[in-house]
């Protein structure tokens, strides 16, 4: 597979990425051990920590949290009605409103229930078990992680074959939560429906989208404003991750889907 050769042509200063399956690395390129900002890809880590807390009984998906009538489940799926700045914009389960503030509320709920700072809980529940020694959360649990592409690829393997949560838990997290909700996918406009799981954004049949036309509708993941992403395609059995030093913009909206299509075409 030479699909990742395209990263060398991206209009960025630094690009590192790779492709993995459930058993290990398929290909990698660039400085994959250099820490870079994950931005909103952080939400995958935070969501996974919340799911661990659910399995442990520390919190429940249907525990009340956030705005009146909202739950942990609503917050994970951006369906609590919270706007990006924490203002209540809609009743729960009526619109898909992407909200960093919702993930900050989630982290607070877990921290209070566990009696630990959320960074400590994340470290014990996710980062150490997955051997992500160079990834840290400094700042918002919605967008404050930084770490190397090698760690992001390890997270991709986990989301192909889970070890810190049960397969049934991951299956629920990657199915549509609150189907049919309309919303805006940041950078790609209004989507009807704007399907989301309990943390991961779901490809479904969205257009335009940051994954490729060859990605199955079951593909899921997240991208960040720092210029990186992780997608997992369960039907292909592959995950692809990239981190860069250039913020998301039109260059990424063009380059990322093309890369995904190259990766999936090369695997056939």
Image (cartoon, rainbow, N blue to C red):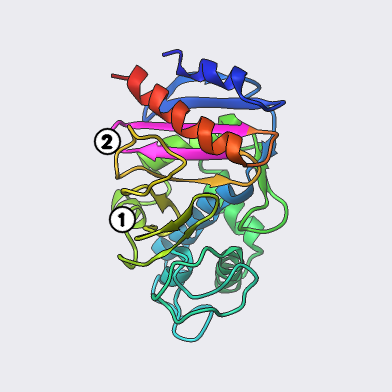
User: Based on the displayed image, in which of its 4 quarters is residue 57 positioned?
Assistant: bottom left
Give the magenta part as a residue range: 228-243
**Residue drawn at (40%, 70%) of the image:** 61
Residue 153: tell me if it is visible: no
Q: Position of residue 178 (x, y in %)?
A: 33, 68
Residue 202: tell me if it is visible. Answer: yes
- Which percent across, then down, holds residue 4? 50, 19
Report the residue marked by disc 1.
175
What mark, if any, has residue 235 been given in the picture? 2
**Label 1 secondary element:** loop
Which residue lies at the image location 64% right of the left edge and 53% below the top edge?
A: 143
Residue 79: mark: none
* Residue in the image at 36% along x and 58% along y: 195
Decide whether the magenta segment is chiefly helix, strand or loop.
strand
Which residue is pictured at 43% across the width and 35% down the height? 157
15 to 90, vertically: above or below: above
Q: Position of residue 63 (x, y in %)?
A: 43, 78
Mark closer to the chain start, 2 or 1: 1
């Amino acid at each position: 597979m030479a699909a990742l050769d395209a990263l060398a042509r991206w209009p960025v200063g630094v690009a590192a990425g790779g492709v993995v399956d459930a058993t290990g690395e398929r290909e990698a390129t660039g400085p994959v051990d250099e820490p870079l900002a994950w931005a909103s890809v952080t939400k995958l880590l935070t969501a996974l920590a919340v799911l661990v807390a659910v399995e442990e009984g520390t919190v429940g998906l249907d525990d009340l949290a956030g705005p009146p009538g909202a739950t942990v489940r609503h917050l994970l799926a951006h369906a609590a009605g919270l706007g990006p700045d924490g203002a209540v914009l809609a009743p729960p389960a009526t619109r898909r409103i992407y909200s960093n503030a919702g993930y900050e509320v989630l982290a607070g709920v877990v921290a209070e229930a566990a009696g630990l700072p959320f960074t400590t809980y994340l470290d014990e529940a996710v980062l150490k078990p997955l051997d992500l020694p160079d990834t840290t959360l400094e700042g918002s649990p919605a967008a404050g992680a930084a770490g190397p592409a090698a760690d992001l690829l390890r997270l991709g393997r986990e989301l192909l074959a889970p070890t810190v949560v049960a397969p049934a838990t991951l299956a629920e997290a990657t199915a549509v939560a609150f189907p049919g909700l309309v919303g805006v996918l940041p950078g790609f406009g209004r989507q009807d429906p704007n399907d989301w799981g309990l943390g991961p954004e779901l490809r479904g049949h969205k257009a335009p989208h940051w994954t490729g036309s060859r990605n199955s509708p079951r593909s899921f993941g997240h991208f960040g404003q720092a210029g990186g992403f992780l997608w997992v395609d369960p039907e292909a059995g592959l995950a692809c991750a990239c981190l860069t030093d250039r913020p998301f913009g039109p260059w990424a909206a063009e380059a990322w889907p093309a890369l995904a299509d190259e990766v999936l075409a090369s695997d056939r």
